[in-house]
Amino acid sequence: MLRKMLEKDRKRLRRKIHIRKRVYGSTERPRMTITKSNRRISAQVIDDAKGHTIAAASTLEKELREVKATVAGAGQLGEIMGKRLLEKNIKSVVFDRNGYLYHGIIKALADGSRKAGIEF
């Protein structure tokens, strides 16, 4: 499987596997994972102990379609995600960057969540 992938995707997959060995979400501190493409961004908060998604936000949602996959859009999505978590009384999460480098969109989404009051 790794042989057919592009070099960029292969490196991200290796980083993702390396990160997921250590990052685990509990009921008290669930895991926030990020998925991005050139057009869309999505974030999920997952309780790995139960295997349930607690909250999610995506640019595919009808009310968030105007949010673009840019640094500014990721900041907005992070703030929305933070507000949804605070409504469910979750104040702290483990951040899973899903193998992406921590800059640009990923950093903006994390900063937006912190701005809303979520701790990493």
Image (spheres, rainbow, N blue to C red):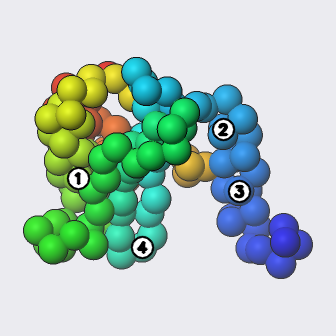
Residue found at x 44% / y 51%:
34
Residue 103 in picture, x, y percent from top left: 45, 45
Please name the residue that numbered disc 3 is placed on. Answer: 13
Binning the other alpha carbons within 10 Å of mark 4 as few (below 14), some (14 to 19) or many (20 upward) gives few
For this rendering, which residue is in front, 82 or 66?
A: 82
Q: Is residue 86 above or below residue 91?
A: below
Residue hosting label 4? 38
Q: CA distance from mark 1 to mark 4?
A: 15 Å
Q: Which residue is mark 1?
A: 77
Seen at 77% across and 74% down, the residue is 5
From what the image shows, is residue 111 above or below residue 81?
A: above
First-in-chain label (3 vs 4)? 3
Q: Position of residue 99 (x, y in %)?
A: 61, 49
Q: Give the foreground label among 4 and 2.
A: 2
Mark 2 and mark 3 in contact (Cβ < 8 Å)?
no
Pick the front one: 20 or 70? 20
SS label for mark 1: helix
- Which numbered disc covers residue 67? none
Q: Residue extending furthest right?
A: 3
Q: Residues within 10 Å of mark 3 (few under 14, many from 20)?
A: some
Q: Amino acid at mark 4?
A: Asn
Which residue type carries mark 2? Ile
- The disc, 3 or 2, on the residue closer to the chain's N-terminal end is 3
Q: Sequence order check: which comes first, mark 3 or mark 1?
A: 3
Q: Earlier in the sequence, mark 1 or mark 4?
A: 4
The circle drawn on residue 19 is 2
For the residues labelled 3 and 4, the Cα–Cα distance comes to: 17 Å
